[in-house]
Amino acid sequence: MSAPILELDGVVKRFGDNEVLRGISLELHRHEVVCLIGASGSGKSTLLRCVNLLETIDEGKITLFGQSLNDPRIDPDQVRRHTGMVFQSFNLFPHLSVLENVLVGPVRALKRKRSDVVEEAMHLLERIGLSDRAKEFPDRLSGGQQQRVAIARSLAMKPALLLLDEVTSALDPSLVGEVLDLLRDLAASGTTMLIATHEMNFARDVAHQVVYLDGGVLVEQGTPEELFTNPKHDSTKQFLERVR
């Protein structure tokens, strides 16, 4: 197997006296999908935010594409050009059309000519089934459609790693499937993803590795078959019984 593109080694994150991540060690390889599962407050979102330099760690080391994120000289914007992050809330620009939301990253952050990236953006919108809504504004879309646009906006930056933080949790249950179907397509096409999710069936179907967090501790990690069929730790068993 090739060298990992993301390595976490003994990562600790505190907010005051609250230790949210307690010695997390984890690897992610190219074209791999790793799903983080665990109850709310287990540290999944904080872990993703640390990888994207939205939070700084207190102990341990994070290495991304062979570069230490602990280096104080590192430019967060350079890191984020190679990592796309999609949040629970869609965070679309309400004053921009769907197409302009997808174009904003390549044009403003990557300084590419708008005329050069319009075709790419329209291809992405076609890929997510929304090319016919390119001129619409976000408030004219359903939640599921907005989340798909948010994912397309991240993909427009051509990230080597896509971070997804509970991207279906704010959606009506009837809209969850369309977003998960898009993520399944991305996984099948080889997109490297680190996903925090409450969707156990999705994790079972798509992940190469599933990581169970509890109270900021990485309790158990394995293939979906290993973790869902034969979990080793009582904490993992109890969590899976609750969510089932």
Image (cartoon, grey):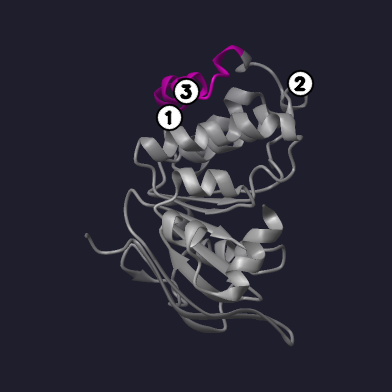
Q: Earlier in the sequence, mark 1 or mark 3?
A: 1
Was residue 19 drawn as part of the magenta stretch in this picture? no
Q: What label sits on residue 113 in the rendered view?
A: 1
Residue sitting at x 38%, y 36%: 188
Q: Secondary structure at mark 3?
A: helix
Residue 78 x %, y %: 44, 57
Residue 54 shows in the view: no
Q: Is residue 141 above or below residue 9?
A: above
Residue 81 x %, y %: 44, 50
Residue 232 x %, y %: 49, 72
Q: Earlier in the sequence, mark 2 or mark 1?
A: 1
Magenta stretch, main secondary structure, is helix
Q: Which residue is mark 3?
A: 127
Amino acid of disc 3: Arg
Q: Secondary structure at mark 1?
A: loop
Q: Is residue 25 above or below residue 114?
A: below
